[in-house]
Image: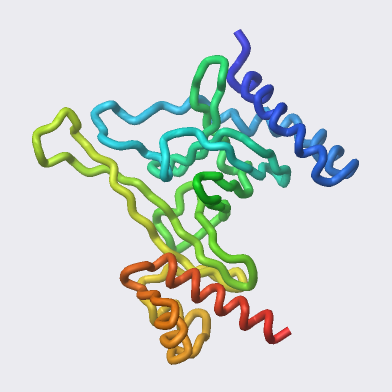
Amino acid sequence: MKSPVFLVFLVLFSFAVEAYAQGGSGLEVKYRDNITLDQEVVSGGYFVDPPKEFEGHPYFFTKNFEQSDITINGLTYRRVPILYNIWKDQVLTFQPIHKQKILIRHDKIDAFTLHLDFPVSFIRLDENPTYSHHGSGIYEYVGEGPSRLLIKHRKQTKPKREFSIYSEVFYETQDYFLQKNGEIIKISGRKQAIDFLSMDPKEVRKSTRDSNLIYRIDRRGYLSFLVSLYNQAQYDKK
């Protein structure tokens, strides 16, 4: 019987055809150099679903595989079926012959984008030393430029208090970070974010009021707005 690694490689090979068109002969050489790595990429083994006694699912946004783009060892593959398990911080693809979820080795992943009703982009960071939930290092990112917002999506379980067929239930939480010039800090308050980006509090207050953004209500929206203001100010200085 063919190994799951070989079978999934065949699937990813079909997705990789589009990669040939991305950069001409140079990319073709790079692709051929990485063929052996492609087989290793999916050698994380089969994924074991959580116990049936757990209510909910461990995935980001949806439990269905979504067509996605993923960059592995510098090569981008298009229209790959992907699930992001935020309980274990694992990225999965689908092995169609045996209908199995397969783990993609996190250390081979550079970035990926899930195409839901809206695209959501993730990047893998090698380290975030002061953060205890770094896991495989996968963070959603918002913003392109000198600064960006990083969001760590996590799911945990807690016991069901009421009588139920379920013993545990999944719940989701997020941690927010700002990255600037390679430095990353976890954000616990509005003032901390403003100080880190060296912004004028009065100008920020006016701009966020004009945009109806309140930190305690919409942390993601507020912080991504600060990032866009900061990046625009840096571009204007050039």
Relative image position of residue 40 (x, y in whole percent): 65, 30
Q: Left of 118 or right of it: where is 76?
A: right
Q: Residue at x 82, y 40 (%)?
A: 21
In the displayed structure, 78 sits above or below 230; it is above
Location of the N terminus (image quadrant): top right
Quarter of the rendering occupied by the C terminus: bottom right
Label count reads 0
Q: Going 85% across and 38% down the picture, which residue do you hit?
A: 28
Question: Residue 63's image quarter?
Answer: top left
| Left or right for 214, reference 34 | left
Residue 175 lies, in percent from the top left, at 39, 60
Q: Is residue 5 left or right of residue 207?
A: right
Q: Position of residue 35 (x, y in %)?
A: 76, 31
**Location of residue 111 with respect to 217 vertically, above or below:** above
Going by the picture, which residue comes out furthest to the left?
A: 163
Dividing the picture into quarters, in which one does residue 234 lie? bottom right
Quick check: 136 above or below 230?
Answer: above
Q: How is the image coloured?
A: rainbow
Answer above or below: position of 199 versus 113. Answer: below
The one nearer the camera, 184 or 165, is: 165
Which residue in the rendered view is the most extreme toward the right?
A: 25
Q: Position of residue 201 (x, y in %)?
A: 44, 89
Query: In this rendering, would 226 be left or right of 232?
Result: left
Q: Residue at x 45, y 33 (%)?
A: 64
